[in-house]
Image (cartoon, grey):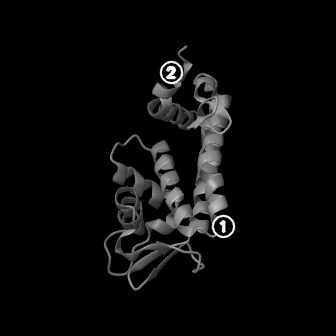
């Protein structure tokens, strides 16, 4: 993101100031990135009752977070696995369906919005229903406020694991290098 005086990794840190060899700075920078570019804006959209935009940003956030726990380049595999594992409501099956809700969400919501600019098969984001996922007449309805709360919980749990587990920290560092290493290196050039 370009903001007047440079290219920013997070709302408060430029790419050129990201230190791959300083765990504390790197973890804080990533936390700032997710909170500032994703979770904070989702909260604002939910506060404004803008369900569609909040849901769309939730989908993007889940794409980011699913990469943290997987080295798989197969998007569907990592996204569905992450969703079903990290947010248990998505591991359920609808009566008479073989697919779990995570797979249906991936196809209808994530792929529909990312590739076609629409939610397929009549799905929608709405605040009307109390649960996070409601299925009415075979239409999936997702409450983006509750989805965002779950995403934030998963993110905070992951960041706590990064701080306490060497294995999680190494995976985190690999992901940062894989996804942002080129940009960080380019930003550090004179």
Q: Quadrant of residue 12?
A: top right
CA neighbours of label 1 inside 10 A, class few (<14), some (14 to 19), many (20+): few
Q: Residue at x 60, y 22 (%)?
A: 21
Query: With respect to residue 76, does 108 lie above or below?
Result: below
Q: Residue at x 65, y 46 (%)?
A: 36
The reply to whether the C-beta atoms of the residues labelled 2 and 1 are less than 8 Å apart is no
Query: Quick check: can you spot residue 153?
Result: no
Check the picture and name the quadrant holding the C terminus: top right
Indicate left or right for 41 with 68 as reference: right
CA neighbours of label 2 inside 10 A, class few (<14), some (14 to 19), many (20+): few
Indicate left or right for 79 with 169 as reference: left
Which element type, helix, strand or loop, lies under badge 2?
Answer: helix
Instruction: Out of 136 and 118, give the one closest to the viewer.
Output: 118
The disc at residue 48 is 1
Residue 99: where, in percent of width, then height?
33, 69
Query: With respect to residue 19, does 153 lie above or below?
Result: below
Residue 48: where, in percent of width, then height?
66, 67
Indicate left or right for 165 with 118 as reference: right
Q: Count up the numbered dots.
A: 2
Query: With respect to residue 149, does 2 lie above or below?
Result: above
The disc at residue 20 is none
Q: Residue at x 44, y 71 (%)?
A: 92
Which element type, helix, strand or loop, lies under badge 1?
Answer: loop
> Alpha carbon of mark 2 to alpha carbon of mark 1: how far?
38 Å
Residue 47: where, in percent of width, then height?
68, 66
Instruction: Out of 119 and 103, give the one closest to the viewer.
Output: 119
Instruction: Out of 190 and 13, give the one closest to the viewer.
Output: 190
Residue 113: where, in percent of width, then height?
40, 61
Q: Quadrant of residue 34?
A: top right
Check the picture and name the quadrant holding the N terminus: top right
Q: Which residue is mark 2?
A: 185
């Amino acid at each position: 993101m370009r903001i007047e005086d440079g290219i920013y990794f997070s709302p408060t840190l430029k790419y050129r100031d990201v230190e791959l060899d300083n765990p504390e700075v790197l973890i804080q920078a990533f936390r700032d990135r997710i909170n500032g570019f994703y979770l904070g804006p989702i909260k604002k959209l939910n506060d404004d009752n803008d369900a569609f935009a909040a849901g769309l940003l939730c989908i993007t956030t889940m794409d980011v977070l699913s990469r943290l726990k997987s080295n798989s380049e197969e998007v569907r595999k990592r996204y569905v696995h992450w969703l079903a594992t990290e947010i248990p409501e998505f591991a359920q099956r609808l009566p008479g369906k073989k697919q779990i809700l995570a797979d249906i969400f991936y196809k209808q919501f994530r792929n529909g919005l990312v590739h076609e600019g629409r939610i397929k098969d009549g799905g929608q984001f709405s605040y009307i229903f109390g649960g996070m996922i409601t299925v009415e007449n075979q239409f999936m309805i997702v409450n983006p406020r509750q989805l965002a709360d779950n995403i934030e919980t998963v993110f905070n749990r992951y960041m706590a694991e990064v701080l306490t587990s060497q294995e999680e920290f190494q995976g985190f560092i690999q992901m940062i290098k894989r996804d942002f290493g080129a940009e960080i290196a380019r930003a550090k050039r004179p």
